[in-house]
Amino acid sequence: MKLKEWLKELEYELLQGSLDVEVDEVVYDSRKAAPGSVFVCMRGANVDSHDFIPDVIAKGTSVIVTEREAEAPASVTVLRVKNGRHALSLLSAARFGYPARKMTTIGVTGTKGKTTTTYMIKAILEAAGYRTGLIGTNGAVIGDEHFPTKNTTPESYILQEYFARMVDAGCRYMVMEVSSQSYLMHRVDGIFFDYSIFLNISNDHIGPNEHASFEE
């Protein structure tokens, strides 16, 4: 796949290199970098993955997506974006062929009750004969398979990977918990839910590395 095929919905600036370079994977963990990979730099609470650019280049990474200027050999394509997490979400969707668009998607958000509500919806849909995938606090459920998740709403790349698995498994519906933190961290950027359910809102998740205020 040529890089330019993954960039149709992403705003970026080409700092150097070619958009015709062949790519086959999107990574945000420097340990997974390899030839043909697109490495997306993100600034976290404790780690700034821009610091690992020399490491991923040494592993043969073809493309660097960065939020600032970066030094790289002329053979490496460098793109600058406003927000690395937003870029990861859109690139991940493109890498897996936009799988969420191949299902009817249902997002459930709110402070309390997301898990219970998603399982109720899944049960109703399956009773009606529709194969349904689920993602949330208790993990991802795809057919008879269960995958543990670290977050209520996983990182965007993992989300898209699960969506692709659901499509391959014949799921017509996908229901998921969408945490407020996932909006803040751009994990669901580019996903347009067919149905959205807003349960409630209260003063949880306000503090360092979360929401700055109730208004936010």
Image: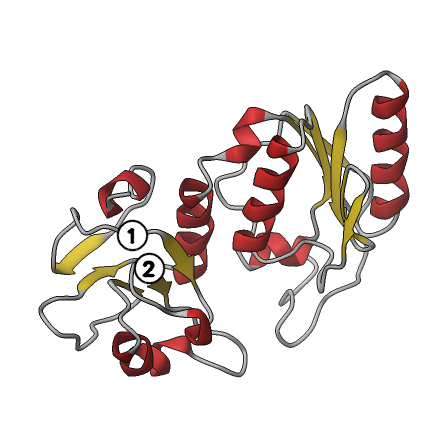
Residue closest to the eye, 31 or 52: 31
Q: Position of residue 72 (x, y in %)?
A: 17, 75
Mark 1 crowd level (few <14, some 14–19, many ≥20, 10 Å Cα): many
The residue singled out by tag 1 in the image is: 23
Is 140 placed left or right of 55 in the picture?
A: right
Q: Secondary structure at mark 1?
A: loop
Q: Is residue 159 visible?
A: yes
Mark 2 sits on what residue?
38
Q: Report, in whole angstroms, how far the alpha carbon at label 1 lies from the one at label 2.
A: 7 Å
Tag 1 near tag 2, CB within 8 Å: yes
Question: Image height check: is 33 above or below 80?
Answer: below
Which part of the image, by quadrant, shows the N terminus? Answer: top left
Residue 72 against residue 133 in the figure, above or below: below
Which residue is rendered at x = 61% and y = 73% of the image?
A: 209
Q: Check disc 1 and give the amino acid type.
A: Val
Q: In terms of secondary structure, where does tag 2 sit?
A: strand
